[in-house]
Image (spheres, helix red, strand yellow):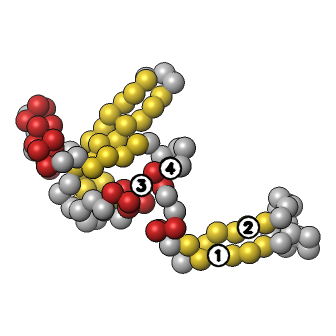
Amino acid sequence: MKLLAVQREKPSGRGFKSRTALSIKIPLKMKDIEMLKHTLVPQHELLKPEDAQNLLKKYNISLSQLPKLSQKDPAIHDLNAKPGDVIKIIRQSPTAGKSIFFRLVTEDG
């Protein structure tokens, strides 16, 4: 079970044992969290089947040669990706600029 802990104060060295800290635990479900809106999660896009085929043709590769990404990965939860789909990941970097990666969605990752 996933939990969100909310406190009124920063925990002391004793953590949650502080007498003045108010701690509330709320059960979370994946649908409650919008992972793609987090600032540290790069942009993820589900490629259309024809775009995925164009990608494979452009680089002369097969689907099995793409790096794998689990269908259970929280970053693609909202994309409703299924095994066999291709995800385009766009990362921004102050040194490299924009970097694009592709991943094949699998059941296991």
Disc 1 packing (10 Å; few <14; some 14–19; many ≥20): few
Say which label, 3 or 1, has the lower sequence index.
1
Checking the image for residue 9, the label placed there is none
Please state which amino acid type lies under the numbered disc 4. Answer: Lys
For the residues marked 4 and 1, what is the alpha-carbon distance in whole angstroms? 21 Å
The residue at which mark 2 appears reads as 6
Kindly report the distance in space between the C-alpha atoms of the residues bearing marks 4 and 3.
10 Å
Spatial distance from mark 3 to mark 1, Cα to Cα? 21 Å
13 displayed left or right of 67: right
Task: Say which label, 4 or 3, has the lower sequence index.
Answer: 4
- Viewer-nearest of labels 4 and 1? 4
The C terminus appears in which quarter of the rendering? bottom left
What amino acid type should be assigned to the residue bearing mark 2?
A: Val
- Look at the numbered disc 1 and give the secondary structure of its residue: strand
- The image shows residue 47 at horizontal and vertical percentages of 22, 46
Q: In which quadrant will I find the N terminus? A: bottom right
User: How far across and down, in percent of the image, does residue 92 sit?
Assistant: 45, 31
